[in-house]
Image (cartoon, rainbow, N blue to C red):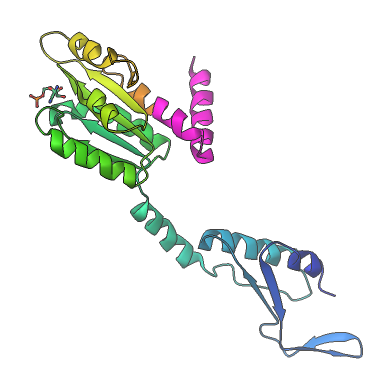
Amino acid sequence: MLFRSREAAALDNVNIFQAATKIVDGKLLTNGGRVLSVSALGSSFSAARTSAYAAVELIKFKGAHFRRDIAARAEKAERVWEDFVAEPLAVVIMGSSSDAEIMSGADLMLKEFDISVDKQVISAHRNARKLADYIAKAEADGVEVIIAGAGMSAHLPGAIAALTTLPVIGVPIAGAGLGGLDALLSMVQMPSGVPVAVMAINGAKNAAILAAEILALKHSSVKKALFEYRTKLAGEC
Ligand code: AIR
């Protein structure tokens, strides 16, 4: 009677209600108006809406028409809300605001992979207590990887690694004087048992890519973004 309506009703989490119709002499009659309601469950508005409209697209009958904008506003609001509440998966910490320009390379790359990130300026030497408190909170909030950039006697990533078992990626920043070699050696020579993954001097972008590779083990959207990035890279050379 209603083309593929059984198939539509069989979709996961979809219910179809028929109303304002009656069968007379084997024919389905209506006075017009709404004759079917399709509802769907989902883990988000967006998922529910996609399921409901997948069912709607299957149902065909003469004179059928339907609204295409149901829950569209809720879906849009949900996207805004998701951006707002997204807990950071990664944090970028730098020893000084003078490191910000170099470390913005990490920020840009994390954005390209759509990874939510928190940024902090905390010096391991100037405010060790604040660093310890922040790392404890980040860990409790579900952060999964930490990028730390610092120059000179750059103990920031090592100090963070001492406070957590989360993976720590260090970025030695080139400062005046020793050109970053000081920071590189400070970071890379960690004692056995407390590693830091150290990037090249000023290698903030690679730090973000490595962070993405760690996150991609669990987060399929990051894995997809990384794959797309690598494909683009290959096309450029
Ligand atoms: N730094 C800050 N606290 C400890 C260290 N190692 C580093 C910063 C920055 C450099 O010292 O990461 O690269 C100079 O910092 P500032 O604030 O003097 O410009």
User: Which residue is the extreme one toward the front?
Assistant: 193
Residue 236 in sight? yes
Percent x, y of residue 19: 71, 85
In which quadrant of the rendered view does residue 161 lie?
A: top left
In the rendered image, residue 163, in percent from the top left (x then y), is placed at 27, 32
Q: Residue furthest right?
A: 25
Instruction: Give above or below for 168 relative to 1.
Output: above
The residue that appears at 33% across and 25% down in the rendered structure is: 169
Residue 207: x and y in percent read: 35, 24
Q: Which of 88 and 32 is in front in this view?
A: 88
Residue 97: percent from the left, percent from the top? 14, 31
Is 211 contained in the magenta span? yes
Q: Which residue is drawn at 20% across and 37% down?
A: 132
Residue displayed at 52% across by 60% down: 44
Magenta stretch secondary structure, dominant? helix
**Quarter of the picture holding the N terminus:** bottom right
Q: Give the range drawn in magenta.
A: 210-237
Q: In terms of image quadrants, where is residue 167? A: top left
Taking the image as drawn, is residue 204 in sight? Answer: no
Which of these two is toward me, 171 or 98?
171
Location of residue 151 with respect to 148 vertically, above or below: above
Splitting the image into 4 quarters, where does residue 104 fall?
top left
Rendered view: 157 above or below 48: above
What residue lies at 52% left-to-right and 63% top-to-bottom?
45
Judge from the rendering whether residue 149 lies leftward or rightward of residue 194; answer left or right: left
Magenta span includes 226: yes
- Whether residue 51 sits left or right of residue 222 in the image: it is right
Q: In which quarter of the image is ligand 1?
A: top left
